[in-house]
Image (tube, rainbow, N blue to C red):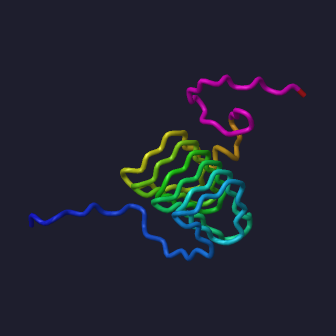
Amino acid sequence: MFGKKTSPKIVRSTDESFETIIGQSTEIHGQIIATQSLRIDGSVTGDIRVSQGSSVSLAIGLTGVVQGDIHAQRLIVGGRVIGNIFVTETVELHDSADLHGDITYGQISIEPGAKINGRMITQANAQQGELTIEGKPTLVGATSSQALPAPASD
């Protein structure tokens, strides 16, 4: 009756298996192109791209830090990302996630406590290409310190 209450997890636990793991004490500088599922518990400075057409997942563990853009089909975040995220399928943000950048996604689930400092853009809006800043989708009516580029004349 007066016992410790546990809050329910909104993001379901995934049964992913990761062929490649970047350990907590590992630092990588440069672009990563993953052809197999990848888990990052260390630090990566550089963009991460996952091979298209494959069922590859990318996970940023609790101690993982990525400074660069991420392009993937599926992404699970428990750590920190400083950069823009482009995910065609699903993004799972756990309560410890700390994101600084825009997220373009197909579907998203967010646990209470996750921190997001950036815009959230659905894949549908991105595909329509309603407005862009330097070729990147942006929200219609969003305020920005950057001016929108003038329409290209044919």
Magenta stretch: dominant SS? Answer: loop
What is the quadrant of residue 88 in the picture?
A: bottom right
Q: List the single residue furthest toward the left.
A: 1
Residue 27 % position (x, y): 60, 58
Q: List the single residue furthest toward the right.
A: 154
Residue 52 % position (x, y): 74, 63
Question: In screen coordinates, is 116 left or right of 6?
Answer: right
Does residue 144 show up magenta in the picture?
A: yes
Task: Indicate whether 120 appears above or below 15.
Answer: above
Residue 24 % position (x, y): 51, 64
Q: Quadrant of the C terminus?
A: top right
45, 102: nearer the viewer: 45
Residue for point 54% across, 50% down: 81
Does residue 96 show up magenta in the picture?
A: no
20, 141: nearer the viewer: 20
Task: Indicate whether 140 appears above or below 80.
Answer: above
Residue for point 59% across, 66% down: 22
Question: In screen coordinates, is 103 left or right of 154?
Answer: left
Residue for point 41% across, 55% down: 96
Give the magenta range.
131-153
Residue 10 % position (x, y): 38, 61
Q: Quadrant of the N terminus?
A: bottom left
67, 146: nearer the viewer: 67
What is the quadrant of residue 153 in the picture?
A: top right
Task: Indicate whether 38 appears above or below 94.
Answer: below
Number of numbered callouts drawn: 0
Question: In screen coordinates, is 50 left or right of 105?
Answer: right
